[in-house]
Structure formats: C-alpha cells, structure tokens
Image: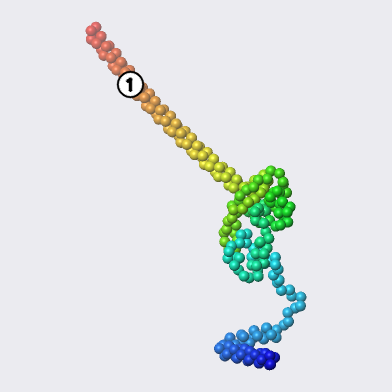
C-alpha cells in the first residue's frame, strides 16, 4: 500500500512538472522559445566535459580567509551558516590577550596584527618573547597598548590591543610617526630660517636706504655751504673794488 502511494505521488509530481513546463513554453514568444530550446539542447546533448577538467574547490582554509574577522560582532555570531560556524570555532580557539605583529613593511606604516594560537602561547611567543613575527628577543621587552586601525569587510575599524616588543622592534612600531614628526620639525625649521633671512634682508634694505638718505643730506649740506662761501667771496671782492675807487677819489 505504501509503495503504491509513493508511485502515485511520483506520477502526479511528474505530470505537474510537465504542465508547468508547457505553461512556461506557451508564455514565451518565438525568439525566447528558440533561445530556450537551444540552451536545453546544449546542456543535455552538448559535448561532454573533459575528464581532466578540475572544478574550483573551496577548502576550509579559503572559508576561514573569507569569513575571518579580527574582532567578531554579535551579527557575525548570529549567522547560522556552516561557514560562519567554522570561522567561529577557529576564532574561539585563539588567545586574545596579546597580539603578534608582522613588521616586514614597517617603513611604509603597514603593520599587521593577529591573535596567538595555543602553540604560540605555550612557547611564550608574544608575551615572554618579542611579539614581532621575525624576532626572538627575550630581553628588554615592553608591553604597549596599540590603537590598531585596519580595513576589513569593506569597513574601517579600530581596536585597542596589547603588543610586547623589544626596544629595536618598538622603534619599528613608531617608525612612521617618528619620521612624520622629524619632517614636520624640519619644515618648521626651514620656515623659521626663511623668515629670519627675509627679516635680515628687510633690515639690510632699511640700513641701505637710511645710509643713502644720510649721504644725500650730507651732499646737500655741502652744496649749500659751497654756495655760501662763493657768495662771501663775491661780497669781499666787491668791497675791495669800492675801497680802491674811494682811495682814487681822495688822491687825484
């Protein structure tokens, strides 16, 4: 009885799909029907795929790389997909007290941070050993609170994290900021030097103008004195002539 019911249901489903297909075909115009028939022919009667053709396979590592978040949000945890469940299971195994840093591009200001795995925690990496990925220094370590700004999933994010580094790697951590500070100080010094040179040039110009003014006044005073001397000589000469005429009149 059960098998007969199952067979009956299968027949009815097949007839229903057939009717739906016919209704769909009747609803198409001649051009759309032609395209559908050609596509169906290619899909069902086309060439067979080569046996050595390898389809892309999405591995668990690819899933983790796509869905991983440095700090997960509540929305991420509420996603029920198996990809997010896999990512969350991996995320929960990480230790989030201290970070590890990749400083291979520190000169351009690009520093990558990630959480530590259990193996790294057991070895002391990132807490008792320098947190730089390529440094194993154990002496002179200092813990820093770093405001980590990063771009993830199309958004700009930031998080305050702890990072333990040696003195040499700490300078790499602040390299770009220190360089920007030095460049700012250099620009300020150049501006101050230009201002001083400009002020000195203005003072020299004022002194030059003042010196020319004094020379001009001195030359003018000298010219006036010369005129007065010439006038005095002329007056004295006239007096001598008058005296001669007077004496000639007294002694004919």
Tell me the colour scheme of the image: rainbow
Q: Is mark 1 on a helix, strand or loop?
A: helix
What residue lies at 63% left-to-right and 91% top-to-bottom? 12
What residue lies at 73% left-to-right and 56% top-to-bottom? 119
Q: Where is residue 109 in the image (x, y as percent from the top left)?
A: 62, 52
What residue lies at 27% left-to-right and 11% top-to-bottom? 244
- Taking depth in this image into account, of 215 and 105 the one nearest to the observer is 105
In the shown orientation, is residue 16 left or right of residue 133? left
- Taking depth in this image into account, of 214 and 123 the one nearest to the observer is 123
What residue lies at 60% left-to-right and 68% top-to-bottom? 79
Reply above or below: 60 against 173.
below
- Taking depth in this image into account, of 10 and 245 the one nearest to the observer is 10
Reply above or below: 124 against 208.
below
Q: Where is residue 197 in the image (x, y as percent from the top left)?
A: 50, 37
Q: Position of residue 190 (x, y in %)?
A: 54, 41
In the shown orientation, is residue 161 left or right of residue 240? right
Furthest toward the front, the residue is: 1
Furthest toward the top, the residue is: 251
Q: Where is residue 234 in the image (x, y as percent from the top left)?
A: 31, 19
Quadrant position of residue 116: bottom right
Furthest toward the right, the residue is: 52
Q: Which corner quadrant holds the N terminus?
A: bottom right
Q: Which corner quadrant holds the C terminus?
A: top left
In the shown orientation, is residue 179 left or right of residue 49? left
- Taking depth in this image into account, of 105 and 233 the one nearest to the observer is 105
Q: Is residue 172 visible?
A: no
Q: Quickly name the residue at label 1.
A: 228
Decide: few, some or many residues near mark 1? Use Cα within 10 Å; few <14, some 14-19, many ≥20.
few
């Amino acid at each position: 009885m059960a098998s007969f019911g199952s067979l009956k249901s299968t027949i009815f489903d097949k007839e229903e799909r057939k009717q739906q297909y016919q209704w769909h075909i009747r609803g198409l115009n001649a051009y759309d029907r032609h395209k559908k028939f050609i596509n169906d022919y290619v899909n069902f009667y086309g060439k067979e795929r080569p046996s050595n053709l390898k389809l892309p396979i999405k591995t668990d590592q690819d899933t983790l790389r796509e869905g991983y978040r440095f700090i997960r949000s509540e929305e991420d945890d509420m996603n029920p997909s198996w990809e997010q469940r896999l990512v969350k299971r991996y995320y929960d195994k990480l230790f989030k007290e201290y970070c590890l840093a990749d400083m291979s591009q520190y000169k351009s200001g690009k520093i990558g941070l990630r959480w530590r795995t259990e193996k790294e925690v057991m070895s002391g990496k990132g807490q008792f050993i320098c947190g730089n990925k390529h440094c194993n220094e154990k002496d002179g370590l200092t813990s820093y609170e770093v405001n980590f700004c990063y771009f993830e999933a199309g958004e700009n994010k930031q998080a305050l994290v702890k990072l333990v580094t040696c003195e040499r790697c700490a300078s790499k951590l602040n390299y770009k900021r220190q360089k920007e500070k030095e460049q700012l100080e250099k620009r300020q010094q150049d501006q101050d030097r230009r201002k001083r040179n400009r002020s000195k040039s203005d003072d020299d110009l004022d002194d030059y103008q003042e010196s020319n003014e004094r020379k001009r006044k001195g030359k003018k005073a000298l010219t006036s004195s010369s005129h007065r001397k010439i006038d005095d000589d002329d007056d004295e000469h006239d007096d001598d002539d008058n005296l001669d005429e007077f004496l000639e009149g007294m002694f004919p």
